[in-house]
Image (cartoon, rainbow, N blue to C red):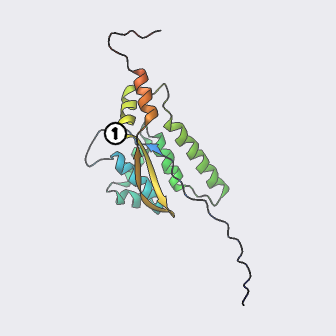
């Protein structure tokens, strides 16, 4: 019987994780950045690590992706972008990833400063989660945003009922 020496333990690279996010609120256009297109862009970005390649994969231009990232209400999209490009091999990369995850967590929470149209957008579009398997883009999942719905319901008054001050 042969005896083989044990293989040296290889340090495992942590699984890539893209935080769930709200799509950037935009006017509805068939050829524009729909919420699904935004989520697919983040997935392709995580796989290819190329903004131009990811934009091309969803049929959009690289310049419009950068403009979308800077739009108001796009904090979650911006954090998902940062998480998709973060490299965990270095300490600086891990710190950037942790900062992106913290920003994404904060962007999911509806604050009192969120307007009614923003809450309605969050309820309509929901939360988008990019699915990666083995570092490869596998698809997206859309979930209902229950916290935005409850915040919206809390702000709506019943007709004929005065709000207590």
Q: At 46% from the left edge and 44% from the top edge, which residue is drawn?
A: 21
Choose between 25 and 62: the one closer to the eye: 25
User: Vertical placement of 90 versus 30: above or below?
Assistant: below
Image spot of residue 66 (x, y percent): 42, 48
Furthest residue in direction bottom, as rendered: 1
Asked whether residue 49 is in view, the answer is no
Q: At 36% from the left edge and 45% from the top edge, which residue is drawn?
A: 35
Q: At 53% from the left edge and 54% from the top edge, which residue is drawn?
A: 17
Choose between 152 and 105: the one closer to the eye: 152
Q: At 51% from the left edge and 48% from the top edge, which residue is drawn?
A: 19
Residue picked out by circle 1: 26
Image spot of residue 78 (x, y percent): 48, 45
Could you say whether the residue bearing mark 1 is in a helix, strand or loop? loop
- Taking the image as shown, residue 155 lies to the left or right of residue 88, namely left
User: The N terminus is located in which quarter?
Assistant: bottom right
- Taking the image as shown, residue 91 lies to the left or right of residue 47, namely right
User: Vertical placement of 164 versus 54: above or below?
Assistant: above
Asked whether residue 141 is in view, the answer is yes
User: Vertical placement of 113 versus 17: above or below?
Assistant: above
Image spot of residue 71 (x, y percent): 41, 39
Furthest residue in direction left, as rendered: 30
Image spot of residue 59 (x, y percent): 31, 57
Few, some or many C-alpha atoms within 10 Å of disc 1 (few <14, some 14-19, many ≥20)? some
User: Vertical placement of 113 versus 13: above or below?
Assistant: above
């Amino acid at each position: 019987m042969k005896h083989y020496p044990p293989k040296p333990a290889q340090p495992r690279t942590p699984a890539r994780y893209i935080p769930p996010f709200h799509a950037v609120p935009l006017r509805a256009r068939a050829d524009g950045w729909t919420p699904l297109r935004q989520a697919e862009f983040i997935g392709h970005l995580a796989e290819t690590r190329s903004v131009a390649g990811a934009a091309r994969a969803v049929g959009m231009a690289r310049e419009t992706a950068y403009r979308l990232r800077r739009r108001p209400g796009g904090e979650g999209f911006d954090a998902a972008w940062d998480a998709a490009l973060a490299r965990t091999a270095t300490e600086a990369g891990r710190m950037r990833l942790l900062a992106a995850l913290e920003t994404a967590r904060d962007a999911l929470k509806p604050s009192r400063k969120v307007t009614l149209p923003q809450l309605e957008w969050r309820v309509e579009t929901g939360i988008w989660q990019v699915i990666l398997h083995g570092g490869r883009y596998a698809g997206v999942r859309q979930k209902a945003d229950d916290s935005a719905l409850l915040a919206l319901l809390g702000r709506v008054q019943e007709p004929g009922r005065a709000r207590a001050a």
